[in-house]
Structure formats: structure tokens, C-alpha cells
Image (cartoon, helix red, strand yellow):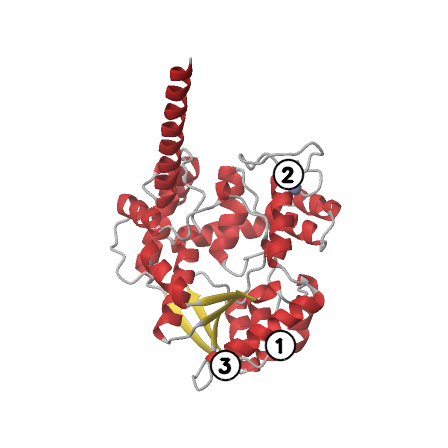
Amino acid sequence: MCTRCVMDTSDPDIRFDGDGVCNHCHTYDETVKREVFVGEQGRRLLEDLVVKVKKDGAGKQYDCMIGVSGGVDSTFVAYKVKQLGLRPLAVHLDNGWDSELAVNNIHKTLEKLGIDLYTHVIDWEEFKDLQLAFLKASTPDSEIPTDHAIVSLLYQTADRLRIKYVITGYTARTEGIGTPAWSQGYYDWKYIESLHRQFGTVPLRTFPHMTRKEWLRFRRKQVWIHILDYVDYVKKDAIKILEHELGWQYYGGKHYESIYTRFFQGYILPRKFGYDKRKFHFSSLICSGEMTREEALEELKKPPYPLEMQEADKTYVVKKLGITEEEFERIMNLPKKTIYDYPSHAKDSRRLVNRLTWLAYRAYAKARQKLL
Ligand SMILES: [Zn+2]
């Protein structure tokens, strides 16, 4: 385990320096230095951005768009954006797994803030089939379909309504640490599609998605602003503000506003793959100074969430996905796979890198032979 954060060798790609500090800590420091602006500098940069957003959006119904999940970060973004005098449209993806608390949070807070909400309800038969396909494919990436649908929905909605700015709740400060081995491919439609072709049965007709080409086209037209990079964002304080001013309610762990996410991250990932995502969540908070290493270690001794709740979730998830307990156990025991076992852009890139490395090595060997 890293001597500074709580990442350990359950990340197969982790590396340590001479002091026992891991590569994630170093990457975190570099990223935060590059992307996060504190104090006066952040305030000034944000002010400039707000002027720009207002100017470009003058005369339009909305000058920006935000994605909402009912969680802390996205709700705080809604609060902040309104405070800055912007006129956002809020977009929510309902994938069928929202907890009641999350839905209440979304409606209550947006109503208080006077922000319009557009909810896209995903076709459940398609989505269920896709989620099952991912479970059967046995990779740790089962949350990718939701992530991909959310970003696709945001890009496409902004494109349709000609909204130039999308304001996100992502910040390297509290989310800077992550590892591809534990989950990757959420921009990789080739991966999602190929995996569904192999394990799915219901055609994906309406599932929000985008190819890499479409993504590049959207990126040329839109500006995505990670607004929390410019404010002195401290999660604990944000929670207090949201509770007091908007009547928002806390729901527990990170991303636990969705029942499937809670179950996947708190049950399937740790039990089947040995990955506990709390480790990189806590590690980010340790690096940002919002949590001590001791607190994180103490917290990690507990199960990801209460065991009775895990069992209740299991019954619920199995039933909702329309499978039997036996089928679920069979899925849990399938040999583990990764994105590289399936057709994907990730696999193509790796193959290209391998090929180039081999060509370079061969050229080097030949040149050396000549010299000898
Ligand atoms: Zn570390």
C-alpha cells in the first residue's frame, strides 16, 4: 500500500517510488497543479468564463447545460451556476435504477433553484439487456453503459438545442485518482457495441450513444467547463450548504444515489474482482486534504455498505434484471475478462502500440547487426 494514500497492489498497474509513494499520488499532484485554481486566481478565471457564457448565450432560452444525478457534486454545480447568474437547462438520465431519495433530491433542489429539468428515460428492455450483456462478458466495466449514455445524452442534447457550454461536476481535486484496470471504455462505443452483439438479445435502437467520430465533432462545437476546478470546493461544506439551503438529503457513499451503482461497486466489484472503488475515492480526498489516511484505513475496515442492505439489493437487482439467483452466482464465478478480450478501440490502440514497438525494435536490431 502507498505510504501517502490507500491505493495498493489490488491495482495491477500501481508503481511506487523510493519513498513508497504511488504513481497515483504523483499524477494527482500534477493534474491538480495543472487544472485546479484556488483562491483569487480561481475566482478571476471563473468570472471571465461566466462573462463569456452569458455573452454567447444572450437571447437564447438557456446559456448552458448541466447534468444532474441527485448526488453532491452535480447538485452543488446547479447551486453554484444559479448563484453566478447563469441560465442552465438541467439534464438527467433515468436508467431505471435511481433511488427514490435521488429523484426527490433532483426535483426538490431544482424547483427551489428555479432550473428547468429535462429527463431522458432510457428504454428499459434495451438497457436491461445491455447490462446483462456486460455482466456475462465478465469485465469490471459494467457501469460503462450508463456513463456512455450520460455523456452521449449531454453532447447530443446540447447539440440539438445549440447550447455551447456544458458545465460538469467533475474535478480532479476529489476525483483525480482512478485506475483504468478497474473500469474503462466509457467513450468506447466499439467496445459496448461489440460486447452487446456477442451477449445481448434485444437490438439497441434508442440507447443514447455516440461513435468516436461524432464525439470529435461535438467536441469541436462545445465547451465543457469543470466548474469545481475554479471554486474552493470542499465536499463536507458543500453537503452542509445543500442540506440547509435546498433541503437536499445525503444518501451515503460516492455514486450511491443509484441502486445498481451501489450494488455493482459495493458487492460485485470487490467480491468478484477484488476492486474496492472506495480506495481511489478516499485516496483523492487524502491528497486533497479532506480526509486523513487513518480515517480512510478505519473506514476501509468496514464493508462498502451494510451487509443486510447488500443482501436486499442483491434480491432486488436479480429480480429486476430478470435472472435467477443461480444465474447470478454463475455470473459471479465466470472467469474474469478485460476490455482487451473484446473488440474495442482500447484493444486497437494497444495492438497499434505493440506493432509500432515491434517495428521499432526490429529496425534497431537490424541497424545494430549492420554495425557489428
Ligand atoms: Zn498514493
What label does residue 55 carry, if any?
3
Please determine whether, in this image, residue 224 is positioned above or below residue 342.
Answer: below
Q: Looking at the image, can residue 54 be seen?
A: yes
Secondary structure of the residue carrying numbered label 2 = loop
Residue drawn at (42%, 52%) of the image:
186
Decide which of 234, 252 is in the foreground and name it: 234
Q: CA distance from mark 2 to mark 3?
A: 44 Å
Q: Residues within 10 Å of mark 2 (few under 14, many from 20)?
A: many
Q: Looking at the image, can residue 211 be seen?
A: no
Please name the amino acid that badge 2 sits on. Cys
Report which quarter residue 161 is drawn in: bottom left
Residue drawn at (42%, 18%) of the image:
368
Please name the amino acid that badge 3 sits on. Lys
Report x, y in % for residue 114.
Answer: 53, 83
Secondary structure of the residue carrying numbered label 3 = helix
The reply to whether the C-beta atoms of the residues labelled 3 and 1 are less than 8 Å apart is: no
Q: Residues within 10 Å of mark 1 (few under 14, many from 20)?
A: some
Decide which of 98, 173 is in the foreground and name it: 173
Which dot, 3 or 1, sits closer to the camera? 3
What label does residue 246 carry, if any?
1
Q: CA distance from mark 3 to mark 1?
A: 28 Å
Please determine whether, in this image, residue 114 is positioned above or below residue 186.
Answer: below
Q: Residues within 10 Å of mark 3 (few under 14, many from 20)?
A: few
Circle 2 residue: 22
Please name the amino acid that badge 1 sits on. Leu
Residue behind label 2 places its C-beta within 8 angstroms of ligand 1: yes
The reply to whether the C-beta atoms of the residues labelled 2 and 3 are less than 8 Å apart is: no
Q: Earlier in the sequence, mark 1 or mark 2?
A: 2
Which dot, 1 or 2, sits closer to the camera? 2
What label does residue 318 carry, if any?
none
Q: Quadrant of the N terminus?
A: top right
